[in-house]
Amino acid sequence: MTAVVTRQPETEPPEPQRTEWPRGSNLRALMSGRRNSVLLLGVLVAWVIVGTIMHGTHTLEIGGADQIGIQNWLGDRANDIQLASSQNFFIQVTHGISDGLNSLILWLQHLISTPAFPRPYPHVGFLGVVVIAWLFTAITAGWRMSILTVACFLAFALLGFWEESMDLLIVTLLAVAISVIVGIPMAILMARNKTARAIVTPVLDVMQTLPSFTYLLPLSLLFEIGPAAAVICTVIYSLPPVMRIASHGLLNVNPATVEATNSMGQTSWQRLRKVDLPMAKRTIIVGINQTTMAALSMATIAAFINGPGLGQPVVRALNALRVGDAFVPGLCIVLMAIMMDRVTTAASQHSENLARGQARNIAELRGRLLIAGAVITTVCVYLGANYTWAAKPPSSSAGTWLANRVQEVIDWISKHWSGATSTISDKFTTIFLNKVEYVVAGSPWFVTGAAILAIAFLLGGRRAFIAALVCVAGLRWLGLWNGAMVTLTATLVATVFVMILAVVFGVWMGRSPRADQVIRPFLDAGQTLPPFVYLIPTLALFGPTRFTAIVAAVAYAAPAAIKIVADGIKAVSATTVEAAESAGALRIQIITKVQIPMARSAFTVAANQGLLYVLSMVVIGGLVGAGALGYDVVAGFKQLPLQGRGLAAGFSIVLLGVMLDRITTYTAQRGAKKAVES
Amino acid sequence: MTSEAIADSKPRLSVAGLWKVFGPKAASIIGTPDADLPRPELLERTGCVAAVKDVSFDVAPGEVFVVMGLSGSGKSTLVRCLTRLIEPTAGSVRLDGSDVAAMSTRELMAVRRNEVAMVFQHFGLLPHRQVLDNVAFGLEIRGEGKEKRYKRSREIIDLVGLKGYENHYPDQLSGGMQQRVGLARALAVDPKVLLFDEPFSALDPLIRRDMQNEVIRLQDDLKTTMVFITHDLSEALKLGDRILIMRDGEVVQIGTPAEVIAAPADDYVKDFVSEIPRSHVLTLKWVMRPQRPDDSLEGPEMDINTIIRNAAQAALASAHPVKVIENGQLVGIVDDEAILRSVVAEEEVSA
Ligand SMILES: Nc1ncnc2c1ncn2[C@@H]1O[C@H](COP(=O)(O)OP(=O)(O)OP(=O)(O)O)[C@@H](O)[C@H]1O
Ligand SMILES: [Mg+2]
């Protein structure tokens, strides 16, 4: 391009038309793309027309408490499992595991959170816990982080949620510990062994597309509702990040170093210990950070199956639709998330600083620090065991005060603004949401099914069609078709808004480093928050409606999608943009004709991630009036007769997730292939 | 060391019939007519690349043996086959008589730990270790105690001129200094054979010259046997006792620098050496002619191994031709014209 551009006579103003990107060689791809768009539009129009004509027939709607066909069968199997626990060997094993885990958790709770009878306080007591946390973060993440940690711990106590906070900490850290102990050896195996990698990677892919909610019911059947099942769900949800990231780090250790050290005759074990692990250390810690955040978000959701911790008061308050009561524990969850994210992030940098700073005398220094730490800890634990003042967390009325103030604000809002917020909510629902639902869920099931298959084929080709066929058939078979379509509607609508935000903010951030610098920290913070947290303010504003769940889902999914788009735009090479600029392209032309087409794959990836995030949040939104599949899952936990339906709803959510993931993934792959071919 | 002395002693390293074929069913290609195909055709027919084809050579104790060739000619593969960092497809690599290619893993580890050390183009240092611990790495994996390995490493760090940098990290050093660490790491295990794979290609010209001089100095001190890979002819001429020239995996010529320049085996080698100032490398041996009866014998006497450039001034100053002496005997005559021809010819080349 540059060559062509420089040959233009300087006196002539460059013609903007010259900069038609992408150019001739892309024409074929463009043509087939255009044909596809026309067909796609045709499918949508046909769907609307046929759906309107046949509206309300064959929608497969079932009553709120009905259980049909396969659901009954699933319910019977669930009952069998519970009844057979004394005979079935497999169930005995799972129950044995959960018994062991439960007593471990109980022991930990007696240590730091709940009264250890006959004492009125846990063994270690408040002072001991805070001092241990302080020392631990000071050593692993530096003194700044240790201050943050102490401040957060004090806040947990002063807000009146000390016990729940410690319970959440126990569930989260236990799950992280198990994930790391299992995940890092697996990551080493994956990095060293191609076959292992080929087997494990697709399993991890599937695990990461499953919305967190779907794990709960089946696992609680196997491991019984309670802390153990909560920890196991959390482990399953938080294991993939550390495995994936650690194996990636180990695989990408500089090959020149590996070869050089091999040439000196190291054994495979020496290579692991002296080369691979130290060189991948920072990446591994990033993996642990991701795993910790995943664990925290799952551990709060596990409140649905009686997982101990801060999730419980939130669920209770949301169930009763008392936002003020949900606010304070929600705030504690946010503090916990910020603390864990900051500490694990800092630990990665700190490990380097430590090793660098005083490398040679660090050993003895660390020895002394450890001794000092042990002495201080012993003293504090001793004090906690013998004096009430050291064992009892400081209490204050701050939590109640805050909850009341929040409730007042919410009451005020609903009094003065309820007009405005409910107008927004109603308008959106009638103008947009109901229309989409009218077509997606109100058409006969075979019409919607056929439309989904056609769209899958046009977007993602044969493989997407087959995946969609399997999923549509599965959804039909599970008997919750109508609920699934309502959930799908909410997911699609929310994703549209996520993508609008992603394009606007992503392009802006991608083009302006300043904007990026200002906005990105908020997105990062947003990504660390467990999904629950988003429900609280939206519920306060919009009450228990489908709209609330959609707003929460948009807020939850937008940060990831925006970041993906921003990075995609940024990756468009500066020289290409420069060439277009020097060819006289206007700014809008550069955005629409250069940056957006070249970052196309980023948009599909953003859509993929957006859909999966939205789906997992929309499902949780079942709790606050979004109904459909999410509600069925929750009902399954609560009412024994509806267990079968709850299980079917869980599987339906999985199928929806897999379907959306496969269609977008294959679409992205097809787009990439086309771009290469042209 | 002269080539005669090399030929006399028992080789330290002896490579015979070495092959490395990358690709499916690599071993089955050797010995078939396919093996003689040029690379693109072989790749098309079998999907294999013959990176090293039937290479044989000996390296004497204390010799600096240079392997050179264009990019892709198989130099890196060859040198990696010597300690089986790349597993050879066929052939033998004898180190003091024992065949590395046939060793068990345990014996091979012992060779890598004690006998052969390697210096790499991209250094391959451990970024999380200080210079001292990088240099001590070979001793550490060999199981030597902390005190002993640090003592030895400090000596070597002094030797390569890095005193004072023991506690720096690799990313705090310049490229040249990093390669000194790489060199020290290899030297620390006191190897019998040092392998270099284009160790100075990533460095700028001035640093490269420093490092070459460093190698020459170390070689004078330690008399280690070296196999040195480079694609830079002047580096090869400067360091090499003998040079092996490779093309597409095959040996084209093995000889002393002078032999290679004065008598290139084919056009490939001739092309290679055409840029080199002959008078800087060649000795009188390559430009002398037999004595004729009418030659004046008044001129200066010079040894047959005198470099032309060093002989030029005295020869041109004298009105009489130079008498070339070998072992006290008059073996030939070099007149002004022969000297001028070798000097002028290269000016034509470089112009
Ligand atoms: N692992 C491999 N698999 C397949 N082919 C390989 C492999 N390694 C090297 N080759 C091929 O073998 C040939 C020789 O490569 P080699 O790296 O030995 O060349 P070289 O002379 O060191 O080149 P350079 O000067 O660029 O380092 C090349 O054609 C290369 O493509
Ligand atoms: Mg090479």
Image (cartoon, rainbow, N blue to C red):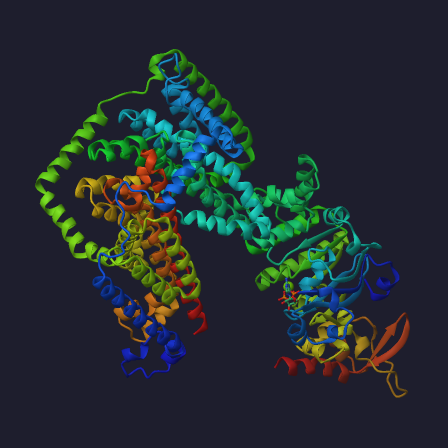
In percent of width and height, residue A60 lies at 28, 52
Residue B216, compared with residue B131, is above or below; it is below
Q: Which residue appears farthest toward the front when viewing the image?
A: A69
Residue A264 left/right relative to A228: right
Residue A594, compared with residue A566, is above or below; it is below
Residue at image point 38% right, 13% down: A119
Residue placed most toward the observer, A167 or B300: A167
Quadrant in the picture for residue B60: bottom right
Residue B187, compared with residue A339, is above or below; it is below
Residue A160 left/right relative to B119: left
In percent of width and height, residue A232 lies at 44, 35
Residue placed most toward the observer, A83 or A495: A83
Q: Residue A293: in sight, yes or no?
A: no
Residue placed most toward the observer, A165 or B344: A165
The C terminus of chain A: image quadrant: bottom left
Q: Residue A27: in sight, yes or no?
A: yes
